[in-house]
Image (cartoon, grey):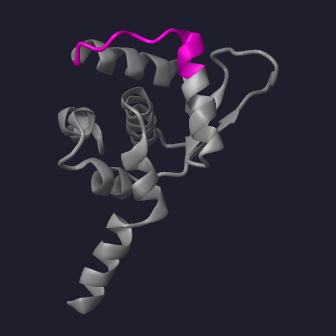
Amino acid sequence: MSHVTKAFIELYNSKTTLLLKALRKYEKLIIIAVGIESQKSTLDKVKLSDVTGRINGMAENLNYEKLKQGEIMEILLRLKAFGILTIMNEKPNKIDNNMHIQTFVYPDELCSAYENECEIYTKFKFLFGE
């Protein structure tokens, strides 16, 4: 039992979990959207177009202002700088829907960070494991 408790404490206080808790509202929205799309996908990476659609659908559902493509890219680049996702593009100097995103955040880390503290996660957690 002590091993389980220790593992839970380590997960709850991991650097990733603490970083996730410190994110701003739209950063949380985007990392949760990427997490949901990653769960749905059989691949390690997801298309930017799928993530964008998910983000805008979630924002509308939450009565948040929809984000423009440039705003989404700006936040994705910030999340990349934090080391919690990567962006892959066949045309590195052009933003297009062929871009792919891969997250380094596991669903249990999202749950640990947001379970009772984030309205976005609470509202959409049922989508993990669709």
Question: Who's the residue at 29% across and 57% down the image?
Answer: 112
Residue 97 lies in magenta, yes or no? no
The residue at 24%/40% (across/down) is 118
Left or right: residue 85 compared with residue 27: right
Q: Is residue 120 left or right of residue 98?
A: left
Instruction: Compare residues 47 and 27 and report the one nearer the observer.
Output: 27
Q: Is residue 126 left or right of residue 82?
A: left
Measured along the vertical axis of the image, is residue 82 above or below residue 124?
A: below
Residue displayed at 56% across by 38% down: 79
Image quarter where the N terminus lies is: bottom left
State how many labels appear. 0
Residue drawn at x 54%, y 16% as measured from the top left: 71
Tell me which corner region of the image, top left, top right, bottom left or bottom right, holds residue 101.
top right
116 or 52, which lies in front?
Answer: 116
Percent x, y of residue 22: 41, 45
Task: Examine the structure image and report whether residue 65 is included in the region drawn in magenta.
Answer: yes
Residue 6 location, x and y as percent?
31, 83
When asked about the image quadrant of residue 49, the answer is top right
Residue in front for this viewpoint, 102 or 115? 115
Is 116 drawn above or below residue 6 in the view shown?
A: above
Q: Position of residue 25 (x, y in %)?
A: 36, 30
Quadrant position of the C terminus in the picture: top left
**Region rendered in magenta:** 62-73
Q: Is residue 53 above or below residue 92?
A: above
